[in-house]
Image (cartoon, grey):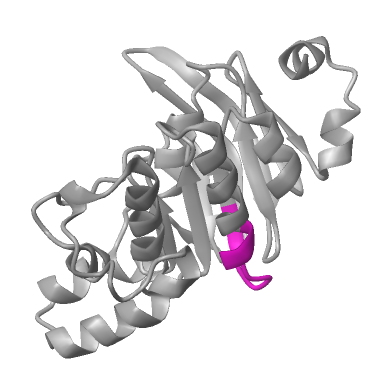
Amino acid sequence: MTIQVLNVSHAFNDKFILKNISFEIFPGDRLCIIGKSGEGKSVLFKLMTGLLEPLYGNISVNGQNVFPLTIKKSQQMGVVFQNPALIDSYNVWENIGLIDIYNRKKYSEIISKVSRILPLVGLNDKDQNKKVEELSGGMKKRVSIARALYHQPKILFFDEPHAGLDPINARLIDDLIINIFQTHQILVMITHNIDSVRKIANKILFIDQQIGYFFQSLDLFLQSNLPIIQEFLS
């Protein structure tokens, strides 16, 4: 499993957001994409998950273009969006197993599969029948992570997983992300939280003024002499 981003540029209304972004990541890699607000991190996230087509360049998984996204390609990915994107009127197990409900799988099979996933995200069988509208922000985030894990993806994507959470729940989500990650997977996370970067990342992509600075290790990033990075870290 390899993700390759090659000379990717993107623009909206003739204004470039990203220019010539290139990097490659492999199983076991935990890439954090960071930078100031408005620097195109979420745009790159959408490009990498096949929700947008690059204006220039190419993004591939094992040599196959991510865009256009297909069901087969999407099942390799577990995606957790900044907003949990849950259906409030559904209960927990229905949200986690939504794709199999849509595909008319037996409810008993879906519930059984959900029951095996719940402990991974700190939930239990008593939680699976709760309506999403009854849950706290932290529990909603856990449900969205459980949904991302449902098909045992090879790639995990997190877009600002700490958004809307207090510092305690943010740290708990970091611990959860570390615990669910397996060495045969690739993890990609967008975050502003430097503490989370220090805890999770082994590779860094720092975006500033459309340009991506890729670091092969956390130490190389933290030791960088680039003024913009030193300013960001301080």
Quadrant of the rendering where the C terminus is positioned: top right
Q: Percent x, y for residue 56?
A: 47, 33
Q: Residue at x 40, y 50 (%)?
A: 80
Say which of 23 and 178 sits in front: 178
Name the spot of residue 16 as percent of width and height, x first.
Answer: 46, 16
Residue 32 visible within the image: yes
220 w.r.t. 87: above or below? above
Q: Is residue 164 left or right of residue 37?
A: left
Please state the horizontal and vertical placement of residue 219, each as a whole percent of the image.
Answer: 88, 39
Residue depicted at 40% across the width and 31% down the height: 164
Percent position (x, y) of residue 13?
A: 31, 13
Give the quadrant of residue 19. top right
Q: Residue at x 46, y 70 (%)?
A: 153
Left or right: residue 192 versus residue 218 is left
Q: Which residues are magenta?
A: 178-187
- Quadrant of the image for the N terminus? bottom right
Asked where in the image residue 95 lies, by quadrant, the reply is bottom left
Residue 179 on the magenta segment: yes
Q: Nearer the viewer, residue 163 or 75?
A: 163
* Residue located 76% across and 19% down the image: 233
